[in-house]
Image: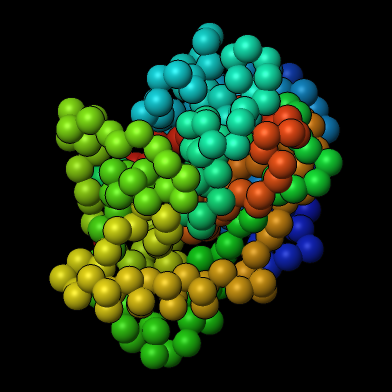
Amino acid sequence: MNLEFEKLETDFGARIHGINQSDYLDEQLVQALTVGLDEHGVLLMRGEEISPGRLVELGRAFGELEILPEPEKRHPDHPEIFDLTNVRSDGEVVDYEEPQAVFLRGTERWHTDSSFREIPCLCTMLYALEVPDSGGETQFANMFSALQQLPADLRAAIDGKRLVHSYVYSRANNPGHMEPMSLEEQKKYPPVSHPWIRTHADGRESLYMGGHVSHVEGMDLDEGRKLIDDVLTAATRNQFIYEHHWAANDLVIWDNRSTLHRLRPYEISARRRVMRRVTVAGFDRVR
Ligand SMILES: [Fe+2]
């Protein structure tokens, strides 16, 4: 094995060379991938077909896989795979206002996956099967750099503060209309709070926020929302962003603990965009 990480032409992110999809994922390879993800935040594997089984195997190399809340979006043979697609089961592309499209459009907000969980997820892997010629890019923002370069007054304002993350809140505030969750469903996802500044296992600090955040714990609601908006604006300036232009067979892996991401708009009711996602559960909640 001769794994190499070629840095992308941005503040962060790297393309992986030297792995074939038939390679056995031994301990050494898994360790190298884990270290690479920690170091680069976003990893790209390009140009090789990855089967659903292999995708699950790659995900498991990083840790336990999450089963996502919506059963109808699970891959029929691999429940750990979440089918992110604007193509309905009848083979037609969705209408702009139908629930599947509204859900996908909701991911156009900056967020980090599963931050509404007590132990937020470690990383997400997204594999492209079909992508539009333009639009539908994914942008990633580096929350290490964003915190380092946060204006001093904002840094002082968030120091020691915690944010409340809630799946019920982010669903209810989706820009399109989504059916409200039943009380039964809501109970499965109680709000949780996480430190706004996350200290990682190696001692580095990053911002931790995004679209599932409902409010700043212990702060006046409006004042807190204003602070969240100000910090998010500062944290998602161009210099912190890598924009991924997808090609079929791309696999992108991102660290959800240190990055935010969002989907860029595309003609959702005209162009096909078919992706498979696996989500690796977190295990090292550091306060
Ligand atoms: Fe996401």
Residue 126 is situated, as x and y percent measured from the top left of the image, at 61, 36
Q: In this rendering, would 90 be left or right of 44? A: left
Q: In this rendering, would 284 be left or right of 25? A: left
Residue 135 is situated, as x and y percent measured from the top left of the image, at 74, 48
Q: Kindly tell me whether residue 274 is visible in this rendering.
A: yes
Q: Which residue lies at the image location 78% right of the left edge and 38% below the top edge?
A: 132
Q: Which residue lies at the image location 73% right of the left edge and 65% below the top edge?
A: 10
Q: Nearest the camera: 286 or 247? A: 247
Residue 81 is situated, as x and y percent measured from the top left of the image, at 52, 23
Q: Looking at the rendering, in which quadrant would you find the N terminus?
A: top right
Q: In this rendering, would 249 be left or right of 92? A: right
The answer to which quarter of the image holds residue 228 is bottom left
Q: Nearest the camera: 24 or 142? A: 142
The answer to which quarter of the image holds residue 251 is top right
- Number of marks: 0
Q: Which residue lies at the image location 68% right of the left edge and 60% below the top edge?
A: 242
Instruction: Examine the rendered structure and indicate whether residue 124 appears above or below residue 147.
Output: above
The answer to which quarter of the image holds residue 58 is top right
Q: Residue lying at the far top in this picture: please name it.
A: 77
Q: How is the image coloured?
A: rainbow
Q: Kindly tell me whether residue 286 is visible in this rendering.
A: no
Q: Which residue lies at the image location 43% right of the left edge and 67% below the top edge?
A: 207
Q: Nearest the camera: 236 or 118? A: 236
Q: Looking at the rendering, in which quadrant would you find the C terminus?
A: bottom left
